[in-house]
Every structure is written in structure tokens, then in C-alpha cells.
Amino acid sequence: MKSVHKQALRRIGTCGLTATALAAVVASGLGAGTAAAAPVPTGGTAGKVYANIGLPDDRWVTGAGSANRFTYWTNAAADRTELSSAAIYLPNGDAPEGGWPVVAWAHDTVGLADKCAPSWSGRTESAARWNDITPWLKKGYAVVASDYAGLGTEGKLPDLQTTIKSDNIIDAVKAAHDIAPNLSAKWAVNGNGSGATAALATARNAVKLQGPDLDFRGATVTSVPADLGALVLNAGPGFIPVPLPTDLTAEVLYAVAGIRASHPEINLDSYLSTEGRALTDKAVKVCSAELQRAVAGTSLNELFTKPVASIPNLGPIVEAYLGVPDSGFAKPVFIGQGLLDTTVVLPYTLDFLNRVQATDRTATIRTYPVDGPGTSATALPDATAFVSKILGG
């Protein structure tokens, strides 16, 4: 195994890692399942590290000089904190004066099962997503990547509301500074797809939540899935009987699965067809690529027996899960969008870009003649130039 930069990464175990803390790391995917019965801890201070361990070789991102996975306390709902897991990757070489500037990586949809957590899923499941991290390391940025609360740690199904994911990202950056003292206070956030939604929420909330020791500078995002909630609310037996791109159908199912778990009072199962219930059940067990294969050729009209919009008070719940901030950003944002992108509902996203442009004159918006998979790579030179500018001062 590659050696961890001991001068940069302090192992919590050397400072008195408790058996309970070690069990929490192991149970969340870092070893055998024998510790899975350990109690799930709750109630710590948001942004504080709970446990930290070096990652084995097959979990290292290309271009990293060190790689650690840690658990930390973060907001999981309005009334409690829980443990989340995250990874921190440092570039090769020595940190510059003032420390490595930080890019927080807001991951795209990976699934709801713990095995899908990017910090531990390995190169096979997360290969495409790892390609989003490597360029930042090569540019000299440390990367902090939260799995989001409930994904990759013991406990119930993750409640992946946009504001909760934003809190998880901010708290991960706080915690990372306790692990790696050679990090700069200056940081930005980057996200693609549903990660873009979390990154934009972070751009709105980070300044007021980060505390006095951090210096948030802005966000870069690509392929923003604007108004995806409209797909959920319009789903039902009367939906156009044409299959959507598989990633969009999978996004709807993940949202339905998450809402079903968090809001049992809605009784979503009573609106689902037999196939819809089976696929929603599958959504909590498999990662994104497998779910996309399972929904190939399936239209949203086949998944429901009643219109989703007929569920009382569902609109605000869907907005909490899938809503995308289009104003109120505390720092500059860069948004890149492919004009051939089928991973979003393009008319919705273009309307979103117009709203941002109308309300935020500091936003930088670029479009590219590429599809969804090509958007983040094509936008990368513009995005890295943007981050270099905002972190340079």
C-alpha cells in the first residue's frame, strides 16, 4: 500500500481512537462486517472528525499523493446530527505556502445503498466520477469528497435533500482541516449532475455556515438537472408512454425511494404499479449503473397507477429533494452546460440558466456543443480557470 503523508494526515487512532469509533469506520465499509452490530452514534458537533483511516491502493484516485477516508459529524435533518463519511485526497508533492487550496467535490447520483458511496466503491463503480477528481489534483488542489449523510455509514436510508447535502459538504471541509493541517482556508465546490444541485446550494449557504476558519470563494457546476421535480410530479399512468433516457428514469426512482422512506405518511406504494414498487425496492439496493440497466425501455407511465400530482402536499417535499437554487449565491458561480445533454431535461435547464443570468450578474455561464458525458470534460478548462481566479486572491 502506498504510504500516507504522515506529516499531513493525522490518524485519529494515534490520538485515542475508541473501539466504538473504529467499529463505526469498519462497519461503514472499511473492513469485515463483524462490527456492523455496533450502535449507530448520533448527536456530535457538526464539522468534527469522528474517525480517520488510510485508503487501500484500489481506492486511490489517480494523481493523489495521499488518500484517506474519514467519518465526521454533520447535519442529517433539522433536528439531529449523524455520521457521514468522506474522502480527502492530497496532490503529490509539498503543499504551497499557505496550504493546499481545497475543492470540495459534490458527487452525482451514485445510488442509495452504502456500497455505492464514492469514497469506498472503488474504481469500477466510480471510474467515470473519479475522472472528475483527478484534474483538480493535477492542478494542485486538495479534494474533499463527502458521501453525504447516510450513504456509506450505518443507519437508515440517506435523506438526500438538497440543503442536507450542502450541509454535509460544508461540514466535510471543516472536518478535513482537522485531519490535514496543511490545507488552505480557501475553498471552492465543484459538482456535476445532481452534484451540481448540491454545489449550488453550497454556494448559497457556505459563507454563513462555514465558521470563522474557512474562506469559501465560489462554485463550478455542469449539467444542472433543473426542474427534475417536474418529472416526478407529472409522472403517472397518463405520462407520455415513451421511455426517457435511463439516467433520468433512475433519478426519478431514487427520488421516489428516498421520499417513500422519509415520508411513510404519504403511502407512495399505493400510487406505484407492481413494476414501480419492484424497481423502487431495487433502487435502495443497487448503484446507479445497475438501476439504469434495469429501467432500460421503461416509461414513467408504467411505474404508477395514479397521478403523482394527486398526492396531497407532495410539491414542497419534491422541491426539498430536487429543487435547484437559482439565486442568492454568496460567491461567484460558474455553470457549464452541453447543448446535446440528455442527462437533463434541456429546456428546463436552459430556462434555469436564463433565470440565473437575469438575477445574478456575477455568474459565469458557458454552453458547449456536446452531450452530457462530455460536458464536464469540455467545460474543465473554463472551470479550472474560474477556480484559479477565485482562489488566487
Image (tube, grey):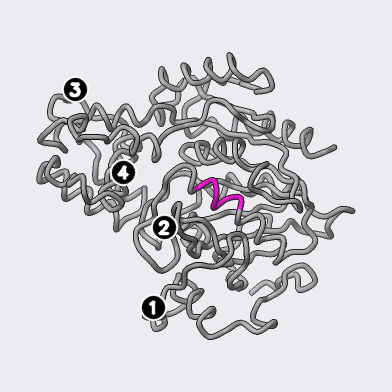
Which residue does the numbered mark 4 point to in the structure image?
292
Task: Left or right? Give the position of 371 relative to 94.
Answer: left
- Mark 3 residue type: Ile
Which quadrant holds the N terminus? bottom right
Secondary structure of the residue carrying tag 1 is: loop
Which quadrant holds the C terminus? top right
Which residue does the numbered mark 3 point to in the structure image?
240
How packed is label 3: few (under 14 Cα within 10 Å), some, or many (20 or more)?
some
Q: Which residue appears at 24% of the width and 41% of the height?
A: 295
Q: CA distance from mark 1 to mark 2?
A: 17 Å
Circle nearer the N terminus (1, 2): 1
Q: Which mark is residue 160?
A: none
Which residue does the numbered mark 2 point to in the structure image?
116
Circle nearer the N terminus (2, 3): 2
Q: Nearer the viewer, mark 1 or mark 2?
A: 1
Circle nearer the N terminus (4, 2): 2
Q: Which sits in the foreground, 35 or 75?
A: 75
Circles 2, 3 touching at the beta carbon (< 8 Å): no
Q: CA distance from mark 2 to mark 3?
A: 31 Å
Circle nearer the N terminus (3, 1): 1
Instruction: Determine the main secondary structure of the stretch shown in magenta.
Output: helix
Residue 286: quarter of image: bottom left
